[in-house]
Amino acid sequence: MLLYIKQDTYGSKLFFENYIQQAEKASISIVKLLCEQALFSYESRTRLTKEKFRVNTKIPIYINQELLLMPSKSPKQYDNIWLNYFAIVGYHPYQSSVVVLFKNRSELVINQSFRIFQNKMRLCEAILSYIKQMDEDIL
């Protein structure tokens, strides 16, 4: 399972539960490619999520049942980290940052206030609830 994507000088590193993969693309390019593989565009997903949930920045991107990526900063910023909501098992404040605990028991410090991070986690929960409801309505 993908834990997070972090940009570096060579492109991006994709951190999985048991290994790390280096990619020669920027993290935003990887996220856009993941969207395209799921048959939608990054731009359409962000636009519709903004409209439905009335958010303007750091829009989480639902890709599939294993990937819901939330940016730690503006996706265009070099030091943005894309966190997979489904891989997070806990988080807690640490000074003026947040420590995120993943399924494989690894930790990552995110330079973001606890309140903002908590709000983004709640937004991810709302997105999942909406998608589940839409799936049930279709069936």
Image (cartoon, rainbow, N blue to C red):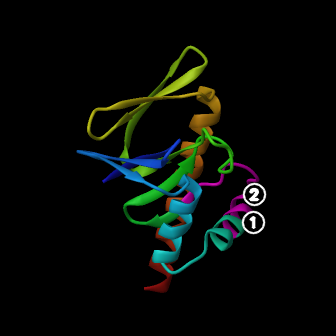
Whether residue 124 is visible: yes
Residue 18 at x, y percent in the picture: 23, 45
Which region of the structure is painted magenta?
A: 48-61
In the drawing, does residue 82 fall left or right of residue 46? left
Considering depth in this image, is 46 or 12 the residue closer to the camera? Answer: 12
Residue 36 at x, y percent in the picture: 52, 75
In the drawing, does residue 8 fall left or right of residue 18? right
The answer to whether 65 is drawn above or below residue 103 in the figure is below
Q: Residue furthest left?
A: 18
Residue 119 at x, y percent in the picture: 62, 40
Residue 56 within the magenta-colored segment of the rendering: yes
Which residue is pictured at 73% across the width and 53% down the height? 55
Q: Quadrant of residue 81?
A: top right
**Residues at circles 1 and 2 in contact by the CB criterion of under 8 Å:** yes
Residue 36 numbered mark, or none: none
Crowdedness of circle 1 by 10 Å Cα count: few (<14), some, many (20+)?
A: few
* Circle 2: residue type: Arg
Considering depth in this image, is 91 or 13 the residue closer to the camera? Answer: 13
Residue 51 numbered mark, or none: 1
Label 2's element? Answer: loop
Q: Residue furthest top?
A: 95
Considering depth in this image, is 78 or 99 the residue closer to the camera? Answer: 78
Where, quadrant-wise, is the N terminus in this rendering? Answer: bottom left
Where, quadrant-wise, is the C terminus in this rendering? Answer: bottom left
Q: Residue furthest bottom?
A: 139
- Residue identifier under label 2: 54
In the drawing, does residue 79 fall left or right of residue 83? right
Label 1's element? Answer: helix
